[in-house]
């Protein structure tokens, strides 16, 4: 017995809203977690909007392109380490 004036449909309707609210809360928390992960993992950009590269990456690329000799590469690599 549920009491005077209370029908089973009222409890069923409340149950649906509880499920919808729970689903909304789960989606909200998941969205916040995804936003934080995206903010932490995104690459750093300098003021011009380009992704910054490490000096060692630039040095390796210059050597690979033949812009600097092996001796220059070795000297600069030691300076950076």
Image (cartoon, grey):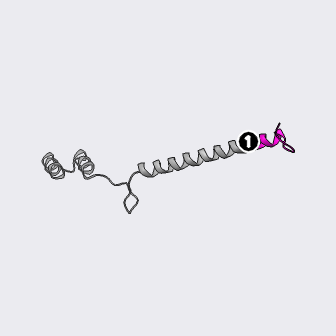
Residue most toward the bottom? 47
* Residue situated in front as seen by the camera: 62 or 57: 57
What residue lies at 23% left-to-right and 50% top-to-bottom?
59
* Residue situated in front as seen by the camera: 70 or 38: 38
Q: Secondary structure at mark 1?
A: helix
Residue 33: x and y, percent? 50, 47
Q: Is residue 48 left or right of residue 25?
A: left
Q: Height in image: 26 above or below 51?
A: above
Residue 67: x and y, percent? 21, 50
Crowd around label 1: few <14 · some 14–19 · many ≥20 (10 Å): few
Residue most toward the right? 5
User: Which stretch did the figure color magenta?
Assistant: 1-15
Q: Is residue 1 left or right of residue 24?
A: right
Q: Is residue 12 magenta?
A: yes
Q: Is residue 6 magenta?
A: yes
Answer with the quarter of the image where residue 45 lies.
Answer: bottom left
Answer with the quarter of the image where residue 52 lies.
Answer: bottom left
Q: Is residue 37 left or right of residue 14?
A: left
Q: Quadrant of the N terminus?
A: top right
What residue lies at 24% left-to-right and 49% top-to-bottom?
56
Answer with the quarter of the image where residue 2 lies.
Answer: top right
Residue 15: x and y, percent? 73, 41
| Residue, disc 1 | 16
Question: How many numbered circles does the render carry?
Answer: 1
What residue lies at 87% left-to-right and 45% top-to-bottom?
5
Residue 66: x and y, percent? 22, 47
* Residue situated in front as seen by the camera: 46 or 27: 27
């Amino acid at each position: 017995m549920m009491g005077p004036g209370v029908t089973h449909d009222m409890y069923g309707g409340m149950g649906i809203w509880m499920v919808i609210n729970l689903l909304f809360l789960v989606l909200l928390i998941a969205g916040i977690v995804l936003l934080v992960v995206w903010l932490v993992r995104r690459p750093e950009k300098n003021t011009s909007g380009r992704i910054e590269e490490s000096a060692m990456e630039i040095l390796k690329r210059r050597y690979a392109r033949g812009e600097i000799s092996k001796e220059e590469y070795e000297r600069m690599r030691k300076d950076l380490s």
